[in-house]
Amino acid sequence: MSIFNFIKGQLIDVIEWTDSDHKEMAHRFDTGGKEIMMGAQLTVRESQVAIFVTEGRIADVFQPGRYELSTQNLPVLTALKSWKYGFNSPFKSEVYFINTRQFLDLKWGTSNPVMMRDKDFGMIRLRAFGIYSFRVQDPVTFLKEVFGTAAYFTTEGVEGQVKRMIVSSLTDTLAESNIPALDLAANYLELSEQAKEIISPRIAPLGLKLESFVIENISLPQEVEKAMDRRTSMGVAGDLDQYAKYQAAEALRESASNPGMGGMGAGLAGAMMMGKMMNEQLGQSVSSEAKPAAATAACVACRAAIPQGSKFCPVCGEKQEAKAAGFCASCGNPVEAGAKFCPNCGAKQ
């Protein structure tokens, strides 16, 4: 091997990166100990950004496209370097590829319950989960604040931080929305949009952009769900008295289907309870329908029917006392003068 071929083998003339891991967000180009040749070909694919770092400083940033490394395409690096061997000499520099595509179907969830004050149930604990997606919006900020000098970086490195921001933002969203627990399921879309507006500025300092945020489910405590089920059952049943009768009939049917003395006893108890309920209901109906009519008497003046024992007639206003003409003060029938009792109704005169 000639000295020329040896030197050429120590130079890199093609720089590119293909994403083999769908979770990889950043990748440092492996030079293998070689030096990058001035005039080398750089290929940056769509959804990628290439960043050159030399002597610990960010030199140049390349958007998608194909470039021939020269003083024209590397203005910052050219200013930082002192070229002793002309513009075709090799140079040492680290090249980082930043993946700017969307990272989809990332899952989030509340590891601990979120406290919420509800007007119907008071203080309740909620759990929620869903999915979200984000991308690298500012590659330089992401390289400085998150990636650093690692060989590669995946979404797992930022998921924990983003999830904590999501849970914190969701707590604020639920507190500010004032939506009752019974209506949360009908407002998932609105809550997702509100939470996204709160989360986005919180992850921007990391160079990230939240593209979507979806609430799939907000689960209530079992006690609240049972209370909601009971309230729903009451609404479906309508008349509580009829619902109680239905429950008693169901208990009677179930107990009758169980063999043994226990089933007989339960069935007898259920039948007695149901009979008692029906008797009470029947007694109420009879008492409400068969009320005795109030006793009446004829007015001593106009002969109108008025309540018995009235001191004045509600029709003509005449005072209800026995007249000199000899009429009974109670029934109004004629009585003989000096009679102490009415011969018709027996009322004292």
Image (cartoon, rainbow, N blue to C red):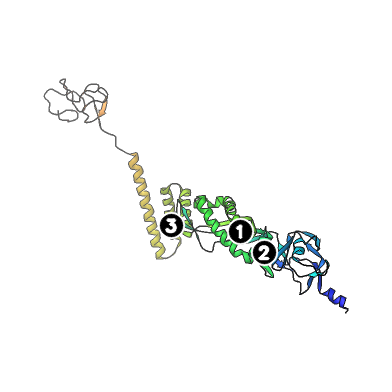
Q: What distance separates the C-alpha of mark 3 from that of mark 2?
A: 69 Å
Image position, residue 170 (x, y; %): 55, 56
Residue at the spot 61% in from the left edge and 64% down from the top edge: 159
Of residues 46 and 330, the one nearer the viewer is: 46
The answer to whether marks 2 and 1 mark residues whose Cβ atoms lie closer than 8 Å is no
Of residues 6 and 318, the one nearer the viewer is: 6
Q: Quadrant of the N terminus?
A: bottom right
Which amino acid is tagged 3? Ala
The answer to whether marks 1 and 3 mark residues whose Cβ atoms lie closer than 8 Å is no
Q: Is residue 4 above or below residue 163?
A: below
Res 225 label: none
Q: Earlier in the sequence, mark 1 or mark 3?
A: 1
Which amino acid is tagged 1? Ile
SS category of the residue bearing label 3: helix
**In the figure, is residue 252 to the left or right of 127?**
left
Image position, residue 220 (x, y; %): 50, 57
The residue that mark 3 highlights is: 251
What residue occupies the far top of the structure in this picture?
Answer: 325
Q: What is the crowding at mark 2: few (fewer than 14 residues within 10 Å), some, or many (at least 20)?
A: many
Q: Is residue 29 above or below residue 249?
A: below
Residue at the spot 22% in from the left edge and 21% down from the top edge: 301
Which amino acid is tagged 2? Leu
Q: What distance separates the C-alpha of mark 1 from that of mark 3?
A: 58 Å
Image position, residue 208 (x, y; %): 64, 59
